Image: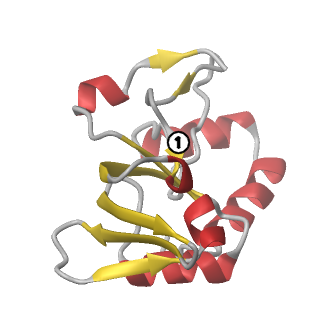
Amino acid sequence: MDYPWEEIHDEADRLEHAASEAMIERIDTQLDHPSADPHGDPIPTAKGQIRRPIGVARLTEVEAGRYEVIRLSDADPQRLIRFRDCGLTPGKPVQVIAHGPRGTTGLLGDQPRSIVLAPAEARAIWVAPPRTRAMRRTLRNP
């Protein structure tokens, strides 16, 4: 619906409290039953199950290596704009090079330039080791 990434959470929250169950079901069907919102937050199924990958951790808590971005905190719209501008989105690969006092240095996807994320930015990103699509769809109750 062409909502900016940093505005979609507030719109969805308002819609959730104003729409009927039938409308929510139709939207879910139209969107092909997504398991996560655009920021990577899990969306429960109609039965209350949540699909979560195994091994998810904040970017600040992982060792150097290759990961997949799983979730971005949507608490700060300005931070979401920065993430989008850097190419940080759920599902994208990221390589952590090092953690230091200035933040976390990493490479995004196949980009040749490294980026430095401030500590607060890195804490707002959840990653997991790269996995196959089938493994990510494992259901686990909340």
Q: Is residue 34 left or right of residue 118?
A: left
> In which quarter of the view is residue 32 placed?
top left
- Give the total number of marks visible in the rendering: 1
Q: Is residue 125 left or right of residue 22?
A: left
Residue that appears at 82% across and 52% down: 18
Q: How is the image coloured?
A: secondary structure
Give the image location of residue 23, x and y in percent.
65, 43
**Mark 1: which secondary structure?**
strand
What amino acid is at disc 1? Ala
Q: Along the line of sight, which residue is nearer the eye, 5 or 98?
A: 98
Q: Is residue 17 above or below residue 96?
A: above
- For label 1, count other residues whose C-alpha is less than 10 Å away and answer few (under 14), some (14-19) or many (20+): some
Q: Is residue 38 above or below residue 118?
A: above
Residue that appears at 27% across and 40% down: 130
Give the image location of residue 7, x and y in percent.
65, 74
Give the image location of residue 30, x and y in percent.
44, 46
Of all residues, the one furthest to the front in this rendering is 101
Q: Along the line of sight, which residue is nearer the eye, 38 or 100?
A: 100
Q: Is residue 61 above or below residue 104?
A: above
Q: Along the line of sight, which residue is nearer the eye, 37 or 31?
A: 37
Residue that appears at 26% across and 25% down: 134
Q: Is residue 132 left or right of residue 36?
A: left
Residue that appears at 62% across and 23% down: 46
Q: Is residue 48 left or right of residue 108?
A: right
The C terminus appears in which quarter of the rendering? top right
Check disc 1 and report the residue beneath it: 57
> In which quarter of the view is residue 124 placed?
bottom right
Q: Is residue 1 above or below residue 123?
A: below
Give the image location of residue 93, x and y in percent.
28, 57
